[in-house]
Image (cartoon, rainbow, N blue to C red):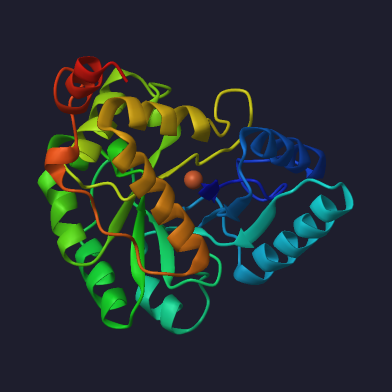
Amino acid sequence: MIDIHTHILPGIDDGAADWDYSIKLARAAAAEGITGIIATPHHYDGKYSNEKETVIELTAELNNRLLGLDIPITIQSGQEIRVHSEFLTNWQGGRLLPMGNSSYVLIEMPSSQIPKSMEQIVYELRLIGIRTVIAHPERNAEVVQHPDRLAELIDLGACAQVTTHSLLGGFGRGIEKSAWNLCRRGLIHVVSSDAHHLEWRGFRMKEAYERVEAEMGPVWRRYFEGNAQAIWDGRALTDQPSLTQSASKAGGWGKLKSLFGK
Ligand SMILES: [Fe+2]
């Protein structure tokens, strides 16, 4: 299992506080069956600034420590980059990190709205072969109210990551509803933990995939898992299942399962 959005690097944002905690997170991830993690510390969010050199250095150090401790997880470097006015200039100047060695980049919008510059960023990145991964749109107030605005960004070339805790109700009923609504509308491409710490923002990847399978069917679980692997490998995303294969709790897949007793 691959987790493409985490705050596992020590002492640089509101995730793992120190090396011991990074290792604790890695052990918890391994126990769930996660084998690959992209470390995506906050960058440019007004509070944290984590330059790519620091991220690359800490990622290498964490990989060394995991190897030494026989914890079977590989870390790739990335950043969760807040939309900012110099985004495209910074990208073109080589100052921002993609996710691992791929041509995907993880972008965070503010929680209140979709910034006006978002369309241009997504579009211009796509023109140079870079695909925007929008972090947890289910927690953005404008997307919650108007999912079509997310659909417009996806039409321009973005894809979207939903957080396990959102799907599992960890951010409250409203966000949970929004998360499943976006999934069922085909506006979500990948599931990830956005893990910060184990107390209430751990991984829960296995649990979330099990819920996806129960709610939407195994084809959607395979789709989300396949896309996490594709981002990890730096490949194109897999084809989305037909939306008729997405089932509501009461209908479709759930009904079929009960009819055939599986
Ligand atoms: Fe995050």
| Residue at image coords 60%, 41% | 14
Q: Nearer the viewer, residue 247 or 41?
A: 247
| Residue at image coords 25%, 39% | 183
Q: Nearer the viewer, residue 250 or 255?
A: 255
Q: Is residue 29 visible?
A: yes
Residue 76 place in picture, x, y as percent: 62, 61
Q: Nearer the viewer, residue 136 or 68?
A: 68
Number of numbered callouts drawn: 0
The image quarter in which residue 214 lies? top left
Quick check: 256 above or below 234? Answer: above
Residue 99 place in picture, x, y as percent: 50, 64
Viewed as shown, does residue 84 lie left or right of 256?
A: right
Farthest residue, direction right: 68
| Residue at image coords 51%, 61% | 232
Residue 47 place in picture, x, y as percent: 53, 49
Farthest residue, direction front: 260
Q: Is residue 190 visible?
A: no
The quadrant of the rendering that contains the C terminus is top left
Quick check: 90 above or below 195? Answer: below
| Residue at image coords 53%, 60% | 79
Residue 64 place in picture, x, y as percent: 82, 59
Viewed as shown, does residue 10 lie left or right of 97?
A: right
Quick check: 62 above or below 136? Answer: below
